[in-house]
Amino acid sequence: MTLLASYIFRTNRRLTASLASQKLVQQALAESQQLYQSILHASPDGVAVSDLQGNILHASPADVAMMGGVTEDQFIGRNISEFLDPAEAQRAIANVSAMLEGVYNGAADYRLIRLDGSLLDVEINAEIVRDAKGQPSGLIFVVRDIRERKKNEERILHMAQHDQLTGLPNRALFSDRLQRSIVNAVRDKTGLALMFIDLDKFKPVNDTYGHAVGDILLQDVARRMLQCLRDSDTVARIGGDEFVVLLRDAHAIPDTLAVAEKIRSALDHPFLIQGHTLQISCSIGIAQFPEHGQDDITLSKNADLAMYRSKERGRNQVCLYEPAQDM
């Protein structure tokens, strides 16, 4: 579509210089212009034509509608930069320059500003318009609305990074956040805490009441834990009844223990699910950065050791990692 529109646009220019008869020129121009307008009207994507400075010369009906306009006159004479998200203006300018130099194919995703101020995610394919001598004389932009594509991409990414049952981050996303948090903690000279949490007496719930009740219980557990944390913290589900918690900017061990105790207490209260009163608890193990490990692998190993120490001591407890546990 971009190449065809560019060809017709170039043909209009060439006809004026090449045809000797004024009548033939006018007839050929009219036919070419009609074909050009037909292409613009037929395209389901928006098509905009500008000069080399970005001043809009033509805008197709689809382009006008996509940008929230009513008539082409609302756009003609205005510069394309007016409709670009300011955060992307420099990238767009660099891309056009690279296209004119022949080192860029003119295709990229951008965010545009519609007439009402709302934002629109689009894919733009650009092509250079050349005059009869082959010199650049303008630009053609074919604009495609990709909001639905973006939503699908975000949905797929969310599914890949989150537990489908609870909506919490999964192991992969949590691991990434933990590694990033350690890097930030080293840079900012702050601390963080990692908790491993295993539910006590969860298997009997599944065995007695079925997995449907067990699933609802896990969802309620996730909600209760979230209520105990700050927005900057992360709780993730990494297994059947296994959860992990990351506390950012956790400087003092007593403060970390207080948060862990808050979680333990919250899960120790009965759950009412489908007419059943369910009683579970949890065992929590804690490793503090940098005291108990300088990297994510060491911290995870030590938090897991502390969690098993909690279970050995009778469950429903909070245990802080102690170096002696390695022995």
Image: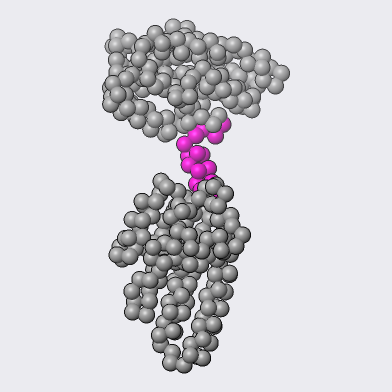
**What is the residue that sits farthest to the top in this orientation?**
313
Dividing the picture into quadrants, the one containing residue 203 is top right
User: What percent of the width, then of the height, locates residue 80?
Assistant: 45, 58
**Residue 261: in sight, yes or no?**
yes
Seen at 52% across and 22% down, the residue is 226
- Which residue is the extreme one toward the right? 275
Q: Nearer the viewer, residue 73 or 106?
A: 73
Main SS of the magenta segment? helix
Q: Which residues are magenta?
A: 147-165
Query: Residue at (47%, 36%) from the top-left corner?
Result: 161
| Left or right: where 38 falls relative to 196 | right
On the rendered structure, is 212 left or right of 43? right
Rendered location of residue 314, percent (x, y): 47, 7
Question: Which quarter of the rendering shows the C terminus?
Answer: top left
Q: Residue at x 70, y 21 (%)?
A: 274
Q: Nearer the viewer, residue 162 or 247?
A: 247
> Colour scheme used in the picture?
one colour
Q: Please identify the quarter of the rendering in which residue 71 is found.
A: bottom right
308 vs 297, left or right, is: right
Q: Is 152 contained in the magenta span? A: yes
For the point 32% across and 60% down, which residue is it? Answer: 97
Q: Position of residue 64 (x, y in %)?
A: 57, 60
Whether residue 274 appears in magenta in the rendering, the answer is no
Residue 142 visible? The answer is: no
| Total numbered circles | 0
Single out the residue that lies furthest toward the bottom. Answer: 21
The image shows residue 73 at horizontal and vertical percentages of 56, 63
